[in-house]
């Protein structure tokens, strides 16, 4: 699919540029020439940048992972609901 008709820039070229490190519309303009003629494609091209809805680049800062997830606690002698497997007992000091 063409992103920039004026300069014949395809979606594949925009994705390759972003995968190679382009992080702004200025980077895409410099690398590919996208949005340098009429500018109608600027918003579409920007959607392929990190954080855009068409981005294939993962923005690591947006992923929240707990550092020390709490251990599952089960009362001694109690069985876990809907489970026929043995339950590991966690000692609490």
Image: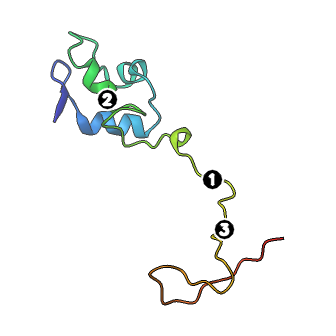
Q: Nearer the viewer, mark 2 or mark 3?
A: 3
Report, in whole angstroms, how far the alpha carbon at label 3 lies from the one at label 1.
Answer: 12 Å
Q: Rate crowding at label 2 as few (under 14), some (14 to 19) or many (20 or more) other CA atoms within 10 Å.
A: some
**Image location of residue 70, percent across then percent down:** 66, 62
Secondary structure state at the residue bearing disc 3: loop
Secondary structure state at the residue bearing disc 1: loop
**Image location of residue 66, percent across then percent down:** 62, 53
Mark 1 and mark 2 in contact? Answer it, CB < 8 Å.
no
Q: Is residue 62 above or below residue 77?
A: above
Residue named by callout 3:
71
Q: Nearer the viewer, residue 75 or 84?
A: 75
Q: Rate crowding at label 1 as few (under 14), some (14 to 19) or many (20 or more) other CA atoms within 10 Å.
A: few
Q: Would you identify the image quadrant in which residue 50 lies?
A: top left
> Residue at left 56%, top 46%?
64
Mark 3 and mark 1 in contact? Answer it, CB < 8 Å.
no
Lower sequence index among marks 2 and 3: 2
Q: Would you identify the image quadrant in which residue 48 lies?
A: top left
> Residue at left 77%, top 77%?
91
**Image location of residue 37, percent across then percent down:** 23, 10
The quadrant of the image that shows the C terminus is bottom right
Q: Nearer the viewer, residue 32 or 18?
A: 18
Secondary structure state at the residue bearing disc 2: loop
> Residue at left 67%, top 54%?
67
- Left or right for 38, reference 33: left
Lower sequence index among marks 1 and 2: 2
The quadrant of the image that shows the N terminus is top left
Q: How is the image coloured?
A: rainbow
Q: Residue 47 bears which disc, if any?
A: 2
Report, in whole angstroms, how far the alpha carbon at label 2 lies from the one at label 3.
Answer: 40 Å
Q: Nearer the viewer, mark 3 or mark 1?
A: 3
Residue named by callout 1:
66
Q: Would you identify the image quadrant in which residue 87 lies?
A: bottom right
């Amino acid at each position: 699919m063409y992103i920039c008709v004026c300069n014949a820039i395809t979606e594949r070229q925009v994705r390759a540029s972003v995968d190679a490190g382009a992080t702004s519309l200025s980077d895409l303009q410099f690398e590919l020439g996208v949005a340098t003629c009429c500018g109608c494609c600027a918003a579409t091209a920007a959607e392929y940048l990190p954080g855009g809805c068409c981005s294939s680049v993962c923005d690591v800062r947006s992923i929240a992972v707990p550092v020390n997830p709490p251990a599952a606690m089960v009362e001694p002698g109690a069985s876990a609901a809907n489970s026929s497997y043995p339950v590991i007992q966690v000692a609490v000091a």
